[in-house]
Image (tube, rainbow, N blue to C red):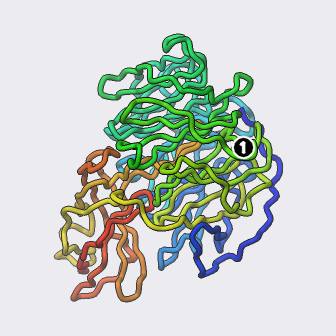
Amino acid sequence: MKTLRSAICVVLLLCAGSALVIAGSWTQLANPAPQAVGPLLQLRDGRILAHSDQLGNANVWYILTPSITGSYVAGTWSGPYAMQAGYSPFFFSSAVLLDGKTIIIEGGEYNLNVAVWTNLGAIGTLTPFGGITFTANPPPPGWTTIGDAQSVVLENGKYLQANCCTKQTAIFFNPGWTPTANVLAQRNEESAYTALPDGRVLMVDVQANTNCGNSTKSSEFYSYSTDTWTCGPQVPIQLWQQSDQDLGAAVLFFAGGTHPLGAVMQFGGNVVATAVFDIASNTWAVGPTPPNGLNQADGPAALEPNGLVLAMLSPGLFNSGCQFVEYDPITNILATIVNSPQCPADSSYEGHLMILPTGQIASVSFDTQIYVYDPSPPVYPGVQPSITSFPSSVCKGTVITCLSGGKNYQVCGTQLNGLSETNAYGDDYQAATNYPLIRFTDPNTLNVYYAWTHGDTNHSIAPGNPSCTLYDLPPIIPVTGTGITYNMEVVVNGIASNPPAQVTIFP
């Protein structure tokens, strides 16, 4: 459980809108959010959805739209978009579903500023390139709590939700819930889900688990194909304290080096420790010890396109003194890096990280100011999505002969869902970006236009996985009678397909 934040103190050290981009540096958005925001979600039309959290009105969301050159630093805001009356949550579950228009928000440790572990939820319906309308979503049958519970979109596209305060889990597949198998631990509270390349879901238990060796170091796997939870290998070090039971973020990083199938970096909660789960050997190992007494009793982490893991840590339980670090899976070194202006004033639990389509990472800490981190190049080898089939000529739908109306064009390829959910945060928030976006760039003006993607054929993050997505053209993309040829890329987790495909767009 976390206490509500009462104040923010941020020293502004960077120039907003600076054109100079330096790898490993931070840049402040030129336009602050209309209210203090926290959790971020990637919409399927290239825009960013931001929740007005704690110091704002937690009933509403805002949308950040990139500039005509594709810059989020120079982006502009719209909104607010309100959820149903009576639902204003902090520390909740969230996801963007595969139909491209459904945003699911579930539970909340707090509602209306009161710690109630609510079972309320909302469904947001996106109008592509427009606004969002929210309606109430009833909880799974019989659930009286959801609270600050974990969630994940499974390989088959269905949404798995935990109940914070019981063993229960349930699957949402629009328009309703189906009860699923109970976890093996005493309850779900303070644990988190990590999607694995083989379709399973990994969970480190933050409870003594009598079903898995009566251990305080147990882990579990969920299989959607059999709807079962099974005991995983023992974690070599207890990563949580009994007094608070908080846990840090868990990030699946790219395969390579000693991890041929990939591995998961798990940060400790109120414990100065980490652990690494190797998928190929099905074993945990002690990870590097965070420097300077830092830990992550809830907090954010994100996988950079270069393969490093960026995380925000702080000392002790909900204390200020935050510090950004990077984990290098190849060298197994965890090192401090330059801070954003959010640190050292904040605590890790106040931070949120999300990869942007540009490969930059947005960082916000219950504030109107958002900062963008520029990771060092290059992109890690072999992780790019690849386009295998697409229509080379499409029409926008502005003339009667365009029968498609500018919609439902199919792009197929491999690794269109990426190789990781990329973004993580303890148990309290989810902001996965492992789904394809379609980006058109005019080679003459370098102006950027995002299509709206939807209807993915699967949600697998297995290496080499083939899949397809549909896209609708954006209304603002320019066309002429003779057509304009654009460079088209699939972008997932901030990583673009290369080389771009050539697509001519007609009226």
x then y, percent, for residue 363? 63, 58
Q: Residues within 10 Å of mark 1 (few under 14, many from 20)?
A: many
Relative to 109, 251 lies left or right? left
x then y, percent, for residue 402? 19, 73
Relative to 469, 343 lies left or right? right
Q: Which residue is mark 1?
A: 294
Q: Indicate the secondary structure of the residue bearing disc 1.
A: strand
- Which of the 4 image quadrants contains residue 470? bottom left
Q: Observer-nearest residue: 124 or 91?
A: 91
Relative to 485, 419 lies left or right? right
Position above or below: 361 against 303: below
Q: Observer-nearest residue: 25 or 114?
A: 25
> Is residue 237 visible to the viewer in this orientation of the structure?
yes
Position above or below: 424 against 235: below
> Is residue 60 visible to the viewer in this orientation of the structure?
no
| Quadrant where the image shows the N terminus | top right
| Quadrant where the image shows the C terminus | bottom left
x then y, percent, for residue 348? 70, 46
The residue located at (70%, 64%) in the rendering is 369
- Which of the 4 image quadrants contains residue 64? bottom right
x then y, percent, for residue 201? 42, 33
The residue located at (48%, 40%) in the rendering is 264
The residue located at (78%, 45%) in the rendering is 5
Q: Observer-nearest residue: 167 or 395?
A: 167
Position above or below: 369 against 322: below
The residue located at (35%, 74%) in the rendering is 440
| Numbered label tally | 1
Q: Amino acid at mark 1?
A: Leu
